[in-house]
Amino acid sequence: MFDGSDKDTSKTGLTKKNTTHADAIEAVKYLEANYKDSSYFIVNHPSRQQKYTVADFRDFINAGPDVTVGLEGMPGHQKELFRGGYSSSTTEKARTYGGADYMIAKVGGLWDSLLGEGRHFWTFVNSDFHSSADTADFYPGEYAKSYTFAASRAAKDIVAGMKTGNSFAVHGDLINMLDFRINNRPMGSAVVIPRKRDLRVEIRFKSPAKNYNGDAVAVDHIDLISGDITGTVAPTDTANYGKDTNSSTKILKRFTKADKEWKTDSGTGITTIVYAVSDMTKNQYFRLRGTNLAIPATDTDKITTLGDPVIDNPLTDTTGTNTKAKAWANLWFYSNPVFVTAK
């Protein structure tokens, strides 16, 4: 009924609702009403054709809070000539940055605007496999992985795990384990503390000795990103319902192996970082990103001196110059957030 590519009209009395935003809202409502516990709704390659606004995302969440899980913040098609297949627009928002969609790669951007409302809206990664040609796609799991903590491998438990937000997304096996907690509460959690108390941030991660490509991999640094939570924006708030930025979002702390907090166990290979956020007086969320790239003295074609990922295919690149070798050399991971209320 709601699939825009499904042309089947054989079912008597079936009215297609598959062309407009209103139809998409009806689809979300249908899932919420009929398959709340066994279905999920994720927006695929969200910035590729500039079809979605933040108001659309707010509409989706409002229509189906139990099924609207999140977005494909790290899209597939990572070895296409235009990384992620992001080639259809003339705006820099429609290109990938270190393989990630602009919506999550931009600190203080669209994803942060939703997290700043306290919305449980998570990021995932997808291979989007169509073909294994050198200028097409990596096989499922070869390059892109979403890790989700679940009670079991049963489908219903995996779906339930996805909805908790206790998951992270990674390219190129940069890490194969991440446990990010605040006051011992995992990703996706809501933590409540008394005002002016300290927070305990704990990050445990591990990288494999080699990734699927046979390369030795290591995390160069991890950014702890924070932003203020100011409350849900109502559809009637026309001044803010379409606002897709969060000016409070910032890199609160950057961790490298030179920091005292960075401690690696030589036996297990697990690195543990413990950090205190002092004197919490505001409601905030915290999320992580990490990369294999070192912070350069001058901007490079992969990372800036501020540590931000660089556009993979500049707008001047009209034929596409991405390669699978470039993809393997430019690796990132993103965690889902933890929300903290100080009262």
Image (tube, rainbow, N blue to C red):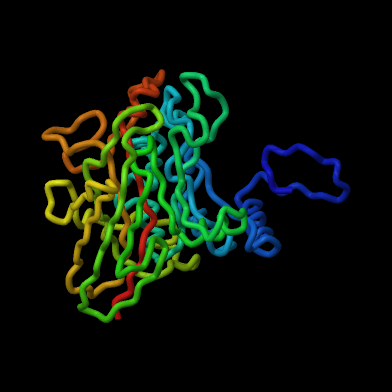
| Rendered location of residue 27, percent (x, y) | 66, 54
Q: Quadrant of the C terminus?
A: bottom left
Asked if residue 127 shows in the view, the reply is: yes
- Which residue appears at 37% of the width and 49% of the height? 177
| Rendered location of residue 41, percent (x, y) | 58, 53
- Which residue appears at 30% of the width and 66% of the height? 182
Q: Nearer the viewer, residue 209 or 261?
A: 209
Q: Nearer the viewer, residue 342 or 219?
A: 219
Q: Nearer the viewer, residue 301 or 165?
A: 165
- Number of marks drawn: 0
Q: Nearer the viewer, residue 326 or 156?
A: 156
Q: Is residue 58 above or below residue 230?
A: above
Residue 152 shown left or right of residue 114 in the figure: right
| Rendered location of residue 321, percent (x, y) | 37, 20
- Which residue appears at 55% of the width and 60% of the height? 160
Asked if residue 254 shows in the view, the reply is: no
Which corner quadrant of the image does residue 279 belong to? bottom left
| Rendered location of residue 233, percent (x, y) | 43, 67
Which corner quadrant of the image does residue 252 belong to? bottom left
Q: Is residue 48 above or below residue 334?
A: above
Residue that extends furthest to the right in the rendered view of this protein = 12
- Which residue appears at 39% of the width and 55% of the height? 336
